[in-house]
């Protein structure tokens, strides 16, 4: 069994940290930016979000909120796909080495 310092010194562990950082920062930036954009729009242009589509009952604000929810689902899907392709193989390799199977 390896110690935490030995695991952190492994090249696979360093690759895992780099792979996670590579995807997490951009995706978090996208979601945070979209959220703050919606909040700022609500704060500074509330009447613009209250305008309805073609005279219907659904407003641009409802559509923007729904779009933010859909964006979060899309970001989650992108992360899961990336994690399955890049992160999980690294985790398995680290786990196997840590248990002494390799």
Image: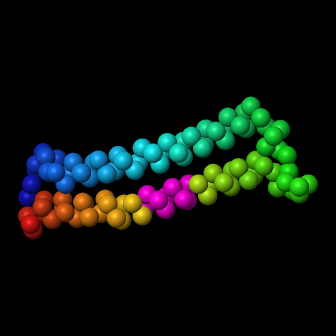
Please, is residue 85 above or below residue 30 in the view?
below
Which of the pair 16/96 is nearer the observer?
A: 16
| Quarter in which the C terminus is drawn | bottom left
| Quarter in which the N terminus is drawn | bottom left
Is residue 77 on the magenta stretch?
yes
Identify the residue at image location x=34%, y=50%: 20
Quick check: 16 left or right of 50?
left
Quick check: 52 left or right of 19?
right
Quick check: 87 left or right of 52?
left
- Residue 74: x percent and y percent? 54, 59
Identify the residue at image location x=9%, y=68%: 101
- Residue 77: x percent and y percent? 49, 62
> In the rendered structure, which segment of residues is drawn in magenta?
72-80
Please, is residue 8 above or below residue 74 in the view?
above
- Residue 59: x percent and y percent? 81, 51
Q: How is the image coloured?
A: rainbow
Please, is residue 32 above or below residue 88 in the view?
above
Asked whether residue 4 is in view, the answer is no
Identify the residue at image location x=30%, y=63%: 88
How many marks are shown on the rendered structure?
A: 0
């Amino acid at each position: 069994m390896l110690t935490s310092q030995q695991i952190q010194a492994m090249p696979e562990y360093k690759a895992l940290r780099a792979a996670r950082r590579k995807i997490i920062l951009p995706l978090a930036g996208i979601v945070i930016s979209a959220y703050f954009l919606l909040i700022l729009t609500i704060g500074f242009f509330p009447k613009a979000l209250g305008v309805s589509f073609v005279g219907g009952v659904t407003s641009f604000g409802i559509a923007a909120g729904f779009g933010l929810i859909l964006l979060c689902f899309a970001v989650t899907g992108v992360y899961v796909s990336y994690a399955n392709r890049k992160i999980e193989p690294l985790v398995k390799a680290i786990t196997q080495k840590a248990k002494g199977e390799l």
